Amino acid sequence: MKRIFFIKPIIEKMRSSDPPFITFRRQRKSGLYMVCSGGRFHPKEEGIVIRVWRSCVVVTDELTDQDAVDAGLSSLRELFEFFRKWYGEVPTRMHKNWFVVLQLEELEKPELLERKVGAGCLL
């Protein structure tokens, strides 16, 4: 299963009854991901699986505070601070990826775990 990294505060919100449902990334995401903390050299699986079901390109100047809240942050300013920390700047365009946190019983459905090859990548 593919891995996706989040900061600890967002991971804790994913465990809540009202989890975030958007993540902003430089690349389009699609399919099932194991949520990890740490970094790629010291990943820690957090026991959470998400399914990214939609993705589109957005212009960061057009983002709102609500977009940041939907991503689990308090404000657009905080989101832009993370962009600067991770990318060195606020990119002009980002991929807005919608996801759902899957429950354990959903992971037992074989159709969700099947990997399909399409357009040269795993979906």
Image (cartoon, grey):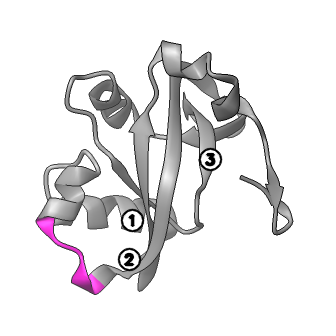
What amino acid does circle 1 point to? Phe
Kind of element beneath mark 1: helix
Q: Determine whether, in the image, residue 28 is placed left or right of residue 48.
A: right
Label 2: which residue? 90
Residue nearest the observer in this picture, 76 or 110: 110
Q: CA distance from mark 2 to mark 1?
A: 5 Å
Where 77 sits versus 107, above or below? below
Mark sitting earlier along the chain (2/3):
3
The secondary structure making up most of the magenta span is helix
Where 93 sits versus 33, above or below? below
Kind of element beneath mark 2: loop
Q: Is residue 62 magenta?
A: yes
Q: Based on the displayed image, in which of its 4 quarters is residue 97 positioned? A: bottom left
Q: Residue at x 41, y 86 (%)?
A: 92
Q: Residue at x 64, y 33 (%)?
A: 112
Residue 33: x and y, percent?
61, 38
Residue 2: x and y, percent?
70, 40
Asked if the residue under mark 1 is in contact with the one under mark 2, i.e. CB atoms within 8 Å, the reply is: yes
- Magenta-drawn segment: 61-65
What amino acid does circle 3 point to? Gly
Q: Is residue 55 magenta?
A: no
What is the quadrant of the N terminus in the image? Answer: top right
Q: Determine whether, in the image, residue 4 is placed left or right of residue 88.
A: right
Asked if the residue under mark 1 is in contact with the one under mark 3, i.e. CB atoms within 8 Å, the reply is: no
Label 1: which residue? 83
Where 8 sits versus 56, above or below? above
Label 3: which residue? 31
Residue 91 visible from this viewpoint: no
